[in-house]
Amino acid sequence: MTERTLVAAIDAMKTARPELTATLGGEMHLLRAIPPIVIHERVERLRPR
């Protein structure tokens, strides 16, 4: 999962649940500060074997 995929997923979630927009919008800058490799490693760990 690339950072772009993650951002797209968050955008889709914001569209589906507008009440989350304020919270997610506030956290987007935090997500962008996380190096994509860290996100990728976490996603790989969560993925079912």
Image: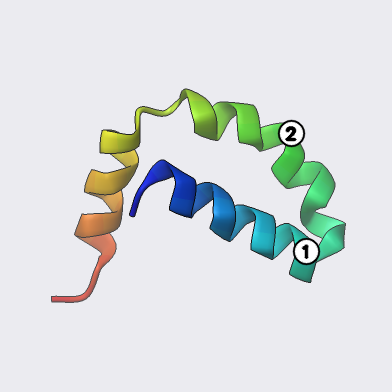
Vertical order, 7 against 48 (above or below): above
Vertical order, 27 against 8 (above or below): above
Percent from the top left, x then y, of residue 24?
71, 45
Specify the farthest residue to the top: 33
In the drawing, does residue 49 fall left or right of residue 37? left
Q: Mark 2 points at which residue?
A: 26
- Quick one: 44 or 9, which is closer to the camera? 9
Q: Mark 1 points at which residue?
A: 15
Q: In which quarter of the image is the N terminus?
A: bottom left
Instruction: Give the SS element for disc 1.
Output: helix
Percent from the top left, x then y, of residue 16?
76, 70
Specify the farthest residue to the bottom: 49
Q: Number of labelled discs?
A: 2
* Residue at 13% over, 76% down: 49
Instruction: Give the SS element for disc 2.
Output: helix
Vertical order, 27 against 7 (above or below): above
Percent from the top left, x then y, of residue 11?
67, 55
Say which of marks 2 and 1 sits in front.
Answer: 1
What amino acid does circle 2 point to? Answer: Gly
Percent from the top left, x then y, of residue 38?
28, 36
Q: Earlier in the sequence, mark 2 or mark 1?
A: 1
Q: Report which quarter residue 27 is drawn in.
A: top right
Specify the farthest residue to the left: 49
Q: Report which quarter residue 10 is drawn in.
A: bottom right
* Residue at 52% over, 29% down: 32
Distance (Cα) linking label 2 and label 1: 16 Å
* Residue at 78% over, 64% down: 15
